[in-house]
Image (tube, rainbow, N blue to C red):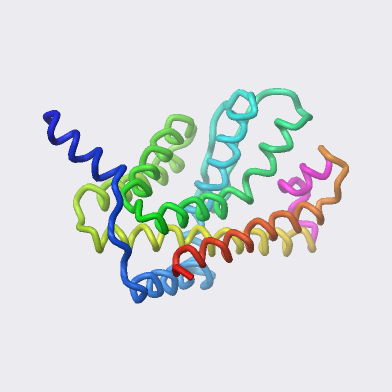
Amino acid sequence: MDIKNISDVWDRVVGTQPHPSVWLVGVTGVVALAAVLPRGVWHVTRNAVTIAHEGGHGLVALLSGRSLEGIRLHSDTSGLTVSRGKPHGIGMVLTAAAGYTAPSLIGLLGAWLLAAGHITALLWGAVALLAAMLVMIRNAYGVLTVVVAGGAFFLVSWLTGATTQAAFGYLAVWFLLLGGVRPVVELQGKRRYGQAPDSDADQLARLTNVPAAMWLVLFYAVALCALLGGGRWLLGV
């Protein structure tokens, strides 16, 4: 690739693209909802939310000065992020709180980029984040999941036209905004029946002496506010 081609690619990434039609934005939102609500479909699509969840743990662990040992993603859509550092303190609290909030906050950032017309930047940013996460994956299923996700973003950004890129970008962001709510609902249900004694909310309760129910409220607040704010950005209202 010569300098001119590199310059053209860079201009595409940092430049803006036309906003898609309201019809396309609405359809991608409906498709995303259909990928979140049905139980059978969700069992597959939830893998994408798990990537964001564990990626959130890992990123905040690094930003708070902890040592990231690795990330594992499992076929049952669960995951595990292992970091080293003090077993208490603000770094550990932020790391534990990052998981359930990450999909919604990433979706909100994505909605802001799309509202500003940076569709290609969104796609390439996703590729970069997934490539960085791949380095820390420590199991085969996790590698496969991240490679498939990153490959999808790359192929769409490199091979398709503006309309397809916009549809894919809006679908991904809608999915994160909507998909960020359901895991919190599921966590609440599991805790009600005592099925998640070591959940992020329970770990936070032990770290802070703040009841796990209050951390659930925080997770709900972040997810719902991100959905409301991000949805308004996407719809242009």
* Pick the front one: 52 or 163: 163
Which residue appears at 26% of the width and 53% of the height? 156
Which residue appears at 40% of the width and 55% of the height? 116
In this rendering, the answer to whether 4 lies above or below 231 is above
* Pick the front one: 184 or 234: 234
- Tell me which corner region of the image, top left, top right, bottom left or bottom right, holds residue 8: top left
Looking at the image, residue 143 sits to the left or right of residue 159; the answer is right
List x then y, in percent, for residue 96: 69, 40
List x then y, in percent, for residue 52: 52, 47
Looking at the image, residue 187 sits to the left or right of residue 164; the answer is right
List x then y, in percent, for residue 143: 41, 39
Q: Is residue 135 magenta?
A: no
Q: How many marks?
A: 0
In this rendering, the answer to whether 58 lies above or below 184 is above
Q: Residue lying farthest right?
A: 209
Which residue appears at 84% of the width and 40% of the height? 208
List x then y, in percent, for residue 73: 51, 43
Looking at the image, residue 27 sits to the left or right of residue 225; the answer is left
Quadrant where the image shows the N terminus: top left
User: Bounds of the magenta span?
Assistant: 193-206
- Tell me which corner region of the image, top left, top right, bottom left or bottom right, holds residue 83: top right
Which residue appears at 38% of the width and 49% of the height? 122
Looking at the image, residue 8 sits to the left or right of residue 147; the answer is left
